[in-house]
Amino acid sequence: MADNAERKSRKLRAEDDREPIDPSSSDAAPRSNDLPQPQSAFNEESSVTAAALLNLVRLLGAELVLVRGLEIGQFERAVRVKLEQFVSPPANPAVRTAGIARARHLVEQVLTQIRAQAEVKSSLTVAKSQDRSSLTSAPSAAKVLN
């Protein structure tokens, strides 16, 4: 069990270091390199907790965008607005600012993953529709043989 937690912790840290995909659309998310980087590190338990919650956000977002057809830009804007509207328990504004910055940094990576999945799905859908249209425009075997 501890090995599994350690792997998830390493995976979360590795995801923090990945170069995000630079989408070309106009409502593209800011690159995570442009965002303020959180200073403190998660302990092992917090890493697992954050990884699990981020995975849930990713799964829910992918369901909304990839399955139900919500526009990725609309989903990204909604997530960012709700993140900024979050009212945190600490009364210390510096702690709130740092916590929201860390959450924003992590969530932007999830949004980048969902955007990449949406782009792949879109390109596969276009390719599939082009294949179908080329099959229907090809002459039938009966016409070729006559």
Image (cartoon, grey):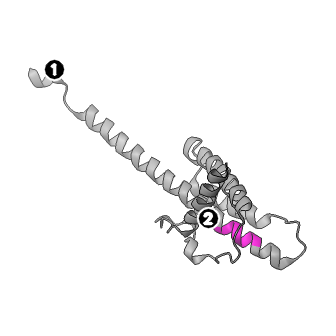
Dot 1 or dot 2: first in sequence order is 2
Q: Is residue 139 magenta?
A: no
Residue extending farthest right = 91
* Span colored in magenta: 99-105
Compared with residue 80, is residue 145 higher up or lower down, i.e. above or below?
above
Q: Residue at x 62, y 47 (%)?
A: 59
- Which of label 1 and label 2 is nearer to you? 2
| Residue on which the image places disc 1 | 142
| Residue on which the image places disc 2 | 108
Q: Quadrant of the C terminus?
A: top left
x, y percentage for residue 34?
57, 77
Compared with residue 54, is residue 36 higher up or lower down, i.e. above or below?
below
* Residue 93 lies in quadrant: bottom right
* Magenta-drawn stretch, dominant element (helix, strand or loop): helix
- How crowded pointer 1 is (Cα within 10 Å; few <14, some 14-19, many 20+) is rated as few
Q: Amino acid at mark 1?
A: Ala
* Residue 107 lies in quadrant: bottom right
Q: Residue at x 73, y 61 (%)?
A: 46
Compared with residue 35, is residue 108 higher up or lower down, i.e. above or below?
above
x, y percentage for residue 140?
19, 25
Q: Amino acid at mark 2?
A: Glu
